[in-house]
């Protein structure tokens, strides 16, 4: 079969073919009706593919080769921190004592694992400048929601039930307003000024005694450091609100600055971004949340504490918002993040920040002559350029992104943040070499040249991928998510 026509696994079916070998059943079959209520017992055979083990292996290996991952190429997806995931993390996460334990085991029998969780919490407290940390949330957005629920519980305990609004900048990551809404708040947008930073006058205008919190990313999604952060903190605290730090991307502040010192009350981290957990395939992630002293009572329960030499779970938390995840968080990702922090050490983490920021500024300056640079200032770990100039030639940012696929690169984040026209948001990360950065820059410059001289080649890209340009509207509006024989 030609590579381009990879059949579906169902189309490889040969009746009776199996991918396993098990001995004949030599004991009486269990009577399912004793175990499962009748209405849940399947009456028809499930329509599963019937293939050999080798068929399965070849099928999924072939599909996996069509994927782009950090291990196969440069992946400068802004606000995603697609950095290299060190393989030593995988080694440690696979150690028997970590990989083969069960969350239902008695705490006394898994003291090593609990010790690792406890130490990780201590490291994250130190890195963020917070007083306590929970490892329960399974992703960044989940951490946001957890943090907001704590803020809500805090205001309610103070009788401040009128605090129903969460302020979010117009450059915010989409999960911020979404989490605020799911946590039962109303979102209020605060504008950015011409420097790409939160407009302080607008902030003063929207803040009030109905303010529950301000959610902020710093550096913001334009890669710019909110230099007025202390003043913003005093405006919000002065009005009785809390400051929430979206720390999904900590690559610009690790070992340099701490949200806790900037005046933030709550912070979530994405261990699957900054702390080298593999991601991009949809999980599992880890979004720990750190809080300042006055929010500790509301942390999800149980919390992990040290009593003498023992690590124990404390369930006696009457003001807790409750459990936010079955068991205690995605332990495997936490092991990887712990390994990363311990292999880097404080100096290594500082070097991460310095190199991430250097790489981003280097790329930004080299691309600046060829694209529009909406905010001409030093950036932090990422930056945005605009394809406005190319759009006038009939080449959209989407076309540029598609053309990059022909050069073997994953495109940057596009059309985000929303406050920049024809936006491209590029985050090179610290793990890439200068040679890789240069080749990507060369590809971008060539595409800019093509836009002037030969726009069709960009407009019709990609030319070299298995699947050509897709109808993205149709894919989003009418996704086909299930195999149906008649299709
Ligand atoms: C990735 C990201 C999130 C969401 O994290 P998930 O783990 O995908 O839920 C939130 N905020 C920012 C700034 C991010 O980059």
Image: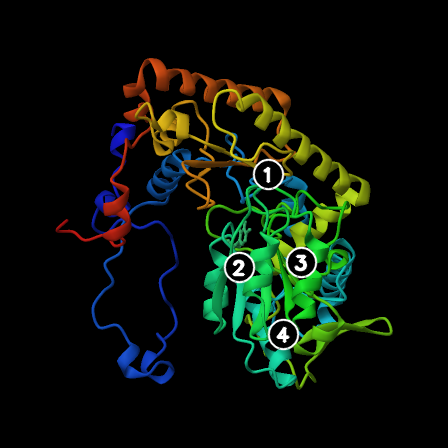
Q: Quadrant of the N terminus?
A: top left
Provide the residue designation for mark 1: 83
Mark 4–mark 2 distance (CA, rounded to whole Å): 24 Å
Q: Residue 420 vs residue 9: left or right?
A: right
Give the mark, 4 or 1, whose residue is nearer the N terminus: 1
Location of residue 397 in the rendering, given as x and y in whole percent from the top left corner = 38, 32
- State if disc 1 and disc 2 touch (CB < 8 Å): no
Location of residue 360 in the rendering, given as x and y in whole percent from the top left corner = 61, 32
Mark 2–mark 1 distance (CA, rounded to whole Å): 27 Å
Among the 4 quarters of the image, the one containing residue 155: bottom right
Q: Regarding mark 4 in the picture, which secondary structure is present there?
A: loop
Provide the residue designation for mark 2: 168
Closest to the observer, 71 or 122:
122
Provide the residue designation for mark 3: 232
Q: Regarding mark 2 in the picture, which secondary structure is present there?
A: strand
Q: Regarding mark 3 in the picture, which secondary structure is present there?
A: helix
Location of residue 161 in the rendering, given as x and y in whole percent from the top left corner = 56, 83
* Disc 1 residue crowd, few under 14, some 14–19, many 20+, Cα 10 Å: many
Closest to the observer, 33 or 104:
104
Among the 4 quarters of the image, the one containing residue 47: bottom left
Give the mark, 3 or 4, whose residue is nearer the N terminus: 3
Please tell me whether residue 481 is drawn above or below residue 154 in the rendered image.
above
Give the mark, 2 or 1, whose residue is nearer the N terminus: 1
Give the mark, 4 or 2, whose residue is nearer the N terminus: 2
Q: Residue at x 61, y 55 (%)?
A: 200
In the picture, the disc for residue 300 is 4
Q: Residue at x 75, y 48 (%)?
A: 257
Please tell me whether residue 107 is drawn above or below residue 7 in the rendered image.
below
């Amino acid at each position: 079969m030609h590579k381009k026509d990879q059949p579906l696994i169902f189309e490889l079916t040969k009746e009776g073919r199996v991918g396993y070998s098990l001995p004949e059943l030599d004991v009486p079959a269990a009577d399912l009706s004793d175990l499962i209520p009748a209405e849940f017992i399947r009456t028809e055979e499930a329509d599963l593919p019937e293939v050999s083990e080798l068929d399965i292996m070849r099928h999924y290996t072939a599909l996996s080769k069509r994927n782009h991952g950090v291990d196969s190429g440069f992946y400068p997806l802004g606000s995603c921190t697609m950095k290299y995931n060190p393989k030593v993390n995988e080694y440690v996460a696979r150690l028997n004592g970590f990989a083969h334990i069960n969350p239902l085991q008695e705490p006394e029998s898994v003291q090593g694992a609990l010790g690792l969780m406890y130490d990780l919490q201590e490291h994250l407290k130190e890195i963020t400048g917070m007083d306590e940390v929970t490892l329960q949330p399974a992703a960044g957005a989940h951490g946001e929601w957890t943090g907001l629920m704590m803020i809500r519980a805090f205001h309610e305990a103070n009788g401040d039930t009128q605090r129903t609004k969460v302020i979010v900048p117009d450059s915010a990551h989409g999960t911020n307003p979404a989490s605020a809404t799911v946590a039962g708040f109303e979102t209020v947008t605060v504008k950015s000024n011409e420097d790409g930073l939160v407009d302080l006058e607008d902030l003063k205008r929207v803040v009030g005694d109905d303010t529950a919190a301000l959610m902020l990313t710093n550096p913001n999604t334009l890669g710019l450091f909110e230099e007025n952060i202390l003043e913003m903190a005093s405006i919000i605290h002065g009005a009785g609100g809390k400051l929430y730090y979206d720390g999904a991307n900590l690559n610009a502040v690790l070992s340099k600055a701490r949200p806790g010192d900037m005046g933030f009350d709550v912070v979530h981290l994405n261990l699957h971004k900054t702390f080298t957990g593999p991601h991009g395939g949809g999980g599992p992630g880890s979004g720990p949340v750190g809080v300042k002293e006055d929010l500790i009572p509301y942390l999800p329960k149980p919390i992990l504490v040290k009593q003498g030499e023992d690590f124990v779970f404390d369930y006696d938390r009457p003001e807790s918002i409750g459990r936010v995840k079955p068991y205690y968080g995605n332990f495997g990702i936490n092991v990887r993040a712990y390994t990363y922090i311990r292999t880097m050490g404080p100096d290594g983490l500082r070097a991460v920040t310095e190199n991430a920021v250097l790489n981003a500024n280097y790329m930004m300056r080299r691309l600046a002559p060829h694209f529009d640079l909406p905010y001409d200032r030093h950036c932090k770990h990422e930056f945005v350029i605009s394809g406005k100039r190319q759009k006038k030639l009939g080449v959209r940012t989407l076309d540029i992104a598609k053309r990059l696929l022909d050069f073997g690169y994953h495109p940057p984040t596009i059309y985000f943040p929303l406050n920049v026209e024809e936006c491209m948001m590029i985050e090179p990360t610290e793990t890439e070499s200068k040679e890789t950065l240069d080749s990507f820059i060369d590809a971008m410059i060539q595409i800019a040249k093509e836009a002037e001289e030969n726009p069709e080649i960009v407009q019709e890209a990609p030319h070299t991928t298995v699947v050509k340009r897709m109808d993205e509207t149709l894919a989003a509006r009418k996704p086909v998510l299930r195999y149906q024989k008649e299709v």
